[in-house]
Image: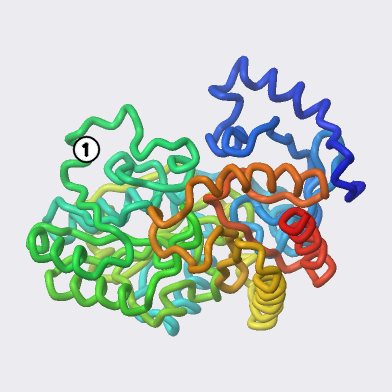
Amino acid sequence: MNPDPSVSLVETRSRAFYERAKAVIPGGVNSPVRAFRAVGGTPLYMERGEGCRLYDADQNEFIDFCNSWGPLITGHRHPAVLAALQDQMARALTFGTPCEQEVLLAEFLISNLKPLTPTIERVRFTSSGTEAVMSALRLARGFTGRAKVLKFDGSYHGHVDSLLVKAGSGLATAGAPDSAGVPPEYTDHTIVVPLDDDEALTAAFRKHGANLAAAIIEPVPANNGLLLQRREFLERIRSLCTEHGALLIFDEVISGFRVGFGGAAAHYKIAPDLVTYGKIIGGGMPVGAFAGRADVFAMLAPDGPVYQAGTLSGNPLAMAAGLAQLQLLTPALYAHLDRLCRLLADDFDALNCGWRMQRLHSIFWLYEGAEPPRRADAIRRESMQTYAKLHRHCLENGVYLAPSGYEVGFLSSPMDEAEIRRLFATLRAFFTT
């Protein structure tokens, strides 16, 4: 694609697909943020991916800094992942029975995660991160015999009814703090506390601690900006959960295997009781998982009374692709991604353009202001208008970012300094001219 910003995208086929889609799919999309409502314009319909690049239906080429919202840490169509999928497809697509692939992936996860986080002793697979969160909450309630759950303002944990209270992600994009269709009684047991507020956190536990089944948090909040928390705040949540007999659930659907193999739990050296995973562990296939303490999982059916099931849970394709990708996640790969992201952030911050870049390993996020926000209400809402213009500028220069300023960006291992320089040059041209 010509990087000249005066050259408009060719969008003929994408526009045609979008018009067709709107006649049969609500809003023309199967996940709201994809509709480009936050940035304007027509959603681009992608046709293929290769390495760190995307090609849309009109054969426009983009460097992909969205990476399917995080799963593609090794890029599109990595040969090892493709080989694992092809091998499995030659035998079966799904069984609806136990299969070897789910055992292999579970063994790999536990054997590699437990030395980093000792509480990771059992794992159950689902088909999405939302399913994993929903199941983890039910398990926590069954284990503790309590009903209430504490979550944090602006944090998004999938479209679980009881957690669609002051959520982020697509809800932030849409400007709606809650979802219609959720009866008030579904959220009666949900306690919401601001991020980065020790006093409010302590007060919530003082008032509700005896009735709390769990506290759930993204230890790396990345669905409503990259709102990195103080380690002390996360440690305080851990200690309060222990003191009051509540379980601590880390939602690592995004941060799991992205900020290092052990995720945020290992990064911060804090052991949660349960962890939810998704994205990277499927190698690009639909997947979710929840993992944690063996004594808690003893309550899960068929061993215990807490029911959880799924027709495609442990799907052999997802298990094979996930295992193949996880086996590629070496210390050298993480060092490569961390170096590239540090280079990008340092160069961007040196522009002194009024915007800065928050980063953790291979996750990055652009924000307006001098200090990185740690709470959703600290994000400048008016900055989203600037981001919408930036998004279009990036598309016209062959760079694909998430179609919302509240969403983060991701690097993938096929990237090198050339791709980082291309993104930086595109950002510099926008913010300094």
Q: Nearer the viewer, residue 282 or 412?
A: 412
Instruction: Name the image quarter holding residue 141.
Output: bottom left
Image coordinates of residue 339 in percent, x first then y, are 69, 79
Q: In the rendered structure, which amino acid carries the disc numbered 1?
A: Tyr
Image coordinates of residue 58 in percent, x first then y, are 85, 34
Q: Residue furthest right?
A: 2
Q: Answer yes or no: is residue 319 visible.
A: no
Instruction: Name the image quarter holding residue 210.
Output: bottom left
The residue lying at 76 percent from left, 61 percent from top is 428
Image coordinates of residue 299 in percent, x first then y, are 22, 60
Instruction: Name the image quarter holding residue 183.
Output: top left
The residue lying at 11 percent from left, 63 percent from top is 209
Q: Circle 1 sits in a helix, a strand or a loop, which is it?
A: helix
- Vertical comparison of 330 with 24: above or below: below
Q: Residue furthest top?
A: 23
For disc 1, the marked residue is 186
The residue lying at 39 percent from left, 82 percent from top is 269
Residue 28 lies left or right of residue 151; in this view the side is right
- Vertical comparison of 391 with 423: above or below: above
The residue lying at 48 percent from left, 59 percent from top is 222
* Colour convention of the picture: rainbow
Q: Nearer the viewer, residue 92 or 58?
A: 58
- Vertical comparison of 419 with 314: above or below: below
Q: Answer yes or no: is residue 405 visible.
A: yes
> How many other residues sit within 10 Å of disc 1, few (<14), some (14-19) or many (≥20)?
few
Q: Quadrant of the C terminus?
A: bottom right
Residue 349 lies left or right of residue 117; in this view the side is right
Image coordinates of residue 281 in percent, x first then y, are 55, 61
Q: Nearer the viewer, residue 310 or 168?
A: 168
Q: How many marks?
A: 1
Residue 375 lies left or right of residue 54; in this view the side is left
